[in-house]
Amino acid sequence: MKAHRQSKIKQIIENQIIETQEDLAAALRARDIEVTQATVSRDIKDMQLVKIPCGNGKYRYAYPMDTQSMHSEDRMQRLFKELVKKIDYSENIIVVKTMPGAANSICAALDNARWPEIIGTVAGDDTILAVVKASSMAEEIALKLEAMSMGIK
């Protein structure tokens, strides 16, 4: 069921401009696949879909072309460079502001990198909260993430 649904999602985003999770859910329902917004959200995260500009200040979901060949750090570097707007921290929490709709993909890449200093992440539409084990590590990790957003390894 999940594999079939995700296969359909890939076909949909390759052939249609899908701007929102609601658009994707509607496109799936039009193909007789009943889904909830939560299921669509999980599929987007599982498939590591990204949002790319499609003109007129709008963004659409896209399937990452090089996912198979990229290492998680390389993918994360690319995502941070292209989609992160601002990084800040307080105590042991790092806040990453992203382009609208990009937080889930970036958060998934950060989770896949499995940095031992980060004990958990939560993503919204354009914001990621990353919890660092110790407050003393937050600045170092925030600077590392900021360097990635500037294209510095």
Image (tube, rainbow, N blue to C red):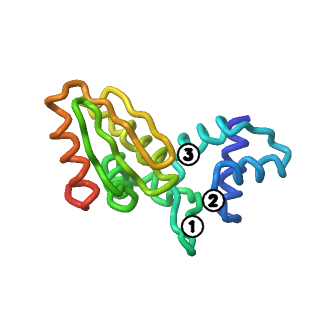
Residue at which label 3 appears? 47
Looking at the image, residue 133 lies above or below residue 142:
above
Name the residue: 54% across, 51% down: 49
Q: Secondary structure at mark 3?
A: helix
The C terminus, quarter of image: bottom left
x and y percentages locating residue 85 in the rendered image: 35, 57
Which of the labelled discs sits on residue 19, or is there none?
2
Q: Position of residue 96 (x, y in %)?
A: 34, 46
Comparing 56 with 36, the one in front is: 56
Whether the residues at callouts 1 and 2 have beta carbons within 8 Å, the answer is: yes
Q: Give the distance between the C-alpha atoms of the residues marked 1 and 2, in whole angstroms.
A: 7 Å
Q: How many marks?
A: 3
User: Residue 62 vs residue 138: left or right?
Assistant: right
Q: Is residue 97 left or right of residue 29?
A: left
Q: Earlier in the sequence, mark 1 or mark 2?
A: 2
At horizontal 17% and vertical 39% (from top left) the residue drawn is 139
Tell me the tag on residue 58: 1
Judge left or right: residue 17 versus residue 71: right
- Amino acid beneath label 1: Lys
Name the spot of residue 34 as percent of width and height, x first: 80, 39
